[in-house]
Amino acid sequence: MLDFDTARQIVDREMDKLRFDRTPEALYEPVKYILSLGGKRMRPALGLMACSLFNQAVHLAIKPALAIELFHNFTLIHDDIIDQSSVRRGQPAVHEKWDTNAAILSGDVMAILSYQVLADVEESQLKEIFQLFNQMALQVCEGQQLDINFEDRTDVDVNEYLKMIELKTAVLIASSLKAGALAGGAEMLDADLLYEFGRNLGIAFQLQDDYLDVFGDPGKTGKKIGNDILSNKKTFLLIKALELAKGNTRKELLKLIKGKNANPKDKIRDVINIYLSLQLDEISNELADSHYSRAIMYLDRVNIPGESKKPLADFAEFMINRDH
Amino acid sequence: MLDFDTARQIVDREMDKLRFDRTPEALYEPVKYILSLGGKRMRPALGLMACSLFNQAVHLAIKPALAIELFHNFTLIHDDIIDQSSVRRGQPAVHEKWDTNAAILSGDVMAILSYQVLADVEESQLKEIFQLFNQMALQVCEGQQLDINFEDRTDVDVNEYLKMIELKTAVLIASSLKAGALAGGAEMLDADLLYEFGRNLGIAFQLQDDYLDVFGDPGKTGKKIGNDILSNKKTFLLIKALELAKGNTRKELLKLIKGKNANPKDKIRDVINIYLSLQLDEISNELADSHYSRAIMYLDRVNIPGESKKPLADFAEFMINRDH
């Protein structure tokens, strides 16, 4: 079975083969730009790894894998407009480098390009994978909408949060795995088990992302600490803090969220102190661990010898223990 | 064969059956809203009419027809943001009624919904129609980008303009007809002839749209005269005027375009006078007529008895002679 690095190399090579040489150039330049910024390419690599469990001919899984990677990058372009994020992968976001209109329209064309790649899936599997892709695509938008809805609320509960990250983040990982498995000829039961593996892993991944924003080492993550704190983003940590904090701690937390003129450094320090007093670092890690364990349980049930599944298990372990 | 009104009734009924009851509601409300504003539903009706040339079972063409209508409405949502148009079908545009972020994300989800409907096309025809749809969708974005590119230019020529409206408007009509024909079991040659019929008809349609903005009767079009003039939109009339006007007329026209503080009524009156002095009303009608004639020529060549094609010919004649 493929390991992650090998799968990633195949993905990089295949991504490089994609040509965006249609015109007008102004429409396609942002597409090339966002892809040039790289990224982990985790989703397509997982798709190829899933395929390789069932079939040595991993090229069968390349089209759905690339389609999902293109779709993911399209959502980044539009999300950065919506979230007013000016930086993406350390470089200017598309709407900063060009403008909002260019980002809207180039994002649209990128979504269509993802479907154009998808249309090249083997005809016998096209309908199934097309429907899986559509379901995933709708859910990603729904997750983004929930995230927006959360902005104006202080009563979001943990279950709502988990649903949001499932939709916005985890279904992409889950669907990559399932599409790859189906492309490789897996039985539906095994494909669904890999979906559940990916769904739980994706949730653990996002919880870890939230954690690293607050407790990560900037030297390793390459990002400043506390971006989510400054933007009052409804991460697991903030939502759980709002649930657990009582009395004066709660008052202070609400004041920190609502305070508009606070010194950024002070705000980050004070919020982190509240998080630590509530032991949210441990609570967050425990929740991520429980999703990781559930992911591994689903992977174990896939009807393939354990040794073959080791690269996926290794990747999951790497993800949950990552410090960047 | 189906006439337009009957096809339109079927389309309306089938559109009403579409359920957008996923959550969160905030994401799907704008989708329902834009569809509630109606519209001519010309594209899906033409798709059903094309299918009925080859097959009485017009339900075969419903999925691609509805998919194209959904896609068309998605583009309206995003175009209205990009063009800063605050009114759509006499009502507030989505980004006005909600906000830009809602319009971006609801537009995205509507594009995906169009693909979700498309995925229900008969499996034997799915790949062909999916690829046709993707090509159309890319071209519509490309047309919109060309339209944006034209804004800052005064040297757009007529051929560039015709290419832009072909991409932005005509390929949707052409693809509706072709997809309907394919769904009805047409030979590729006949489907392609209907595509060319639609492509030329679509160009004539847009030229007529440009004409009505300037020379139409507001009592019939329901729109104020001269919107395109006020926004300096690069319509056929303005592009051709910039080509034909010499000496003082050209100077005056350029001054009118560049003048920022002109009284709107005066500007419209002065530009119309230049158009009339250059006989652009006649030139525009002649060009639309030539595309209409070409459309009919392609329709004539479709390998179906002439009588059966009469409803499509009637519709084309109605379109070219419309005063609203």
Image (tube, coloured by chain):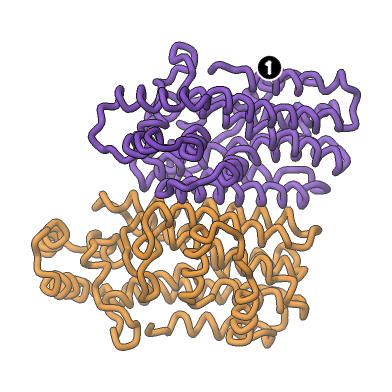
Chain colours: A orange, B purple
Q: Residue at x 36, y 48 (%)?
A: B101
Q: Residue at x 35, y 34 (%)?
A: B252
B74 relative to B43, above or below: below
Q: Does residue A119 appear to the left or right of B208 in the view shown?
A: right
Q: Residue at x 60, y 17 (%)?
A: B322
SS category of the residue bearing label 1: helix
User: Which residue is under mark 1?
Assistant: B5
**Residue type for callout 1:** Asp
Q: Residue B140 at what x, y percent from top left? A: 58, 46
Q: Does residue B50 appear to the left or right of A93 in the view shown?
A: right
Q: Residue A104 at what x, y percent from top left? A: 44, 53
For the residue pair A308 and A129, the one nearer the viewer reads as: A129
Residue B21 visible somewhere in the drawing: no
Q: Badge 1 sits on which subunit? A: B
For the residue pair B304 and A114, the one nearer the viewer reads as: B304
Q: Does residue B244 appear to the left or right of B231 in the view shown?
A: right
For the residue pair B153 and B83, the one nearer the viewer reads as: B153
- Most distant residue in the top direction: B219
B121 relative to A319, above or below: above
Position of the N terminus of chain A, as image quadrant, is bottom right
Position of the C terminus of chain A, as image quadrant, is bottom left
